[in-house]
Amino acid sequence: MYKLAPSLLAADFGIIKEQLAKLDEAKVPYLHLDIMDGVFVPNLSFGLAVVESIRKYTKMVFDVHLMIIEPERYVEQFAKAGTDIFCFHIEATKDAKATVDKIKKYGMKAAIAVKPATPISEIKDLLGELDMVLVMTVEPGFGGQKFMEDQMEKVKELVKLREENNYKYDIEVDGGVNPETIKTCFASGANVIVAGSAVLGAKDISARVEEFAQIAKEYNI
Ligand SMILES: O=C(CO)[C@H](O)[C@H](O)COP(=O)(O)O
Ligand SMILES: [Fe+2]
């Protein structure tokens, strides 16, 4: 089922309450929260305090994308801050299985992200336990980058593996998604769409959300 996850990274933090209200008005289901540590990626964003404080203002599902090393250290804190989906990078941990188990123990949905150079074979053994897989369509670290079309091969591979093994995960794409590139995402089989600049940077947020929803309908997603 199609879900839009606007990325807070593209929001104007000075008017964050108004921005959240606009997303709620547009009936957006997920909010994508990019957590960066300046080590796993060459950028810093925001952390637990921001997640906890905005949790009070919206009921959107919090889809937290952790671009930090050893994400297992923060599972409990993110659960307490109101995270619904805890998504970590396979490249950032030595024990992905233990991390997935810990995420579930704290009542969250478990997702794994793969950088553009990481093949799906790296997470193959865990696919049966995941609620979502995130295929990065840019190098993680910054919003507003160009969509990497070649990553659609991984989306298609995930669709195939899900069918063959009766797995249940959603397939999320993140980076450079706009009204054009969203079409190849749907055509390849992605159903959870992260969009920062294309949604929060749009003149009319509701109109952009509606435009994406119409395209999803055309592709039966
Ligand atoms: O994880 C990310 C960057 O690492 C962001 O979620 C992503 O870049 C969204 O921004 P945009 O839609 O503007 O590309
Ligand atoms: Fe992200």
Image (spheres, helix red, strand yellow):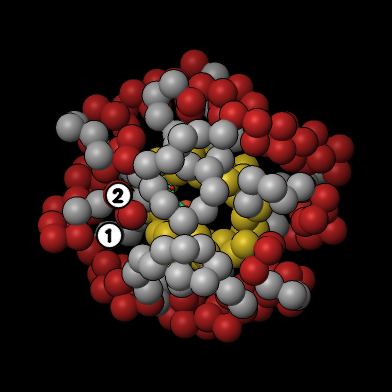
Q: Quadrant of the N terminus?
A: top right
Q: Can residue 84 be seen in this view?
A: no
Compared with 85, 31 (above or below) is above
10 Å crowding of disc 1: few (<14), some (14-19), many (20+) = some
Q: In which quarter of the image is the C terminus?
A: top right
Q: Residue at 69% of width from left, 62% of height from top?
A: 90
- Residue at label 1? 58
Compared with 183, 165 (above or below) is below
Q: Nearer the viewer, mark 1 or mark 2?
A: 2
Lower position in the chain sequence, tag 1 or tag 2 = 2
Nearer to us in this view, 211 or 61:
211
Disc 2 residue type (three-letter): Ala
Q: Would residue 155 be found to the left or right of residue 179 on screen?
A: right
Q: Give how far across and how far down residue 203 sits, in percent.
A: 17, 32
Q: Is residue 201 visible?
A: yes
Disc 1 residue type (three-letter): Thr
- Residue at label 2? 10
Q: Would residue 159 be found to the left or right of residue 143 on screen?
A: right
Marks 1/2: CA–CA distance: 17 Å
Q: Give how far across and how far down residue 133 sits, in percent.
A: 64, 50
Which quadrant holds residue 137?
top right
Q: Give how far across and how far down residue 4 sits, in percent.
A: 42, 40
Nearer to us in this view, 70 or 4:
70
Q: Residue at 36% of width from left, 66% of height from top?
A: 45
Farthest residue, direction top: 218
Ligand 1 closer than 8 Å to label 2 CB:
yes
Q: Give how far across and how far down residue 11 sits, in percent.
A: 25, 52
Q: Do the residues labelled 1 and 2 touch (CB within 8 Å)?
A: no
Which quadrant holds residue 180?
top left
Secondary structure under tag 1 reads loop
Ligand 1 closer than 8 Å to label 1 CB:
no
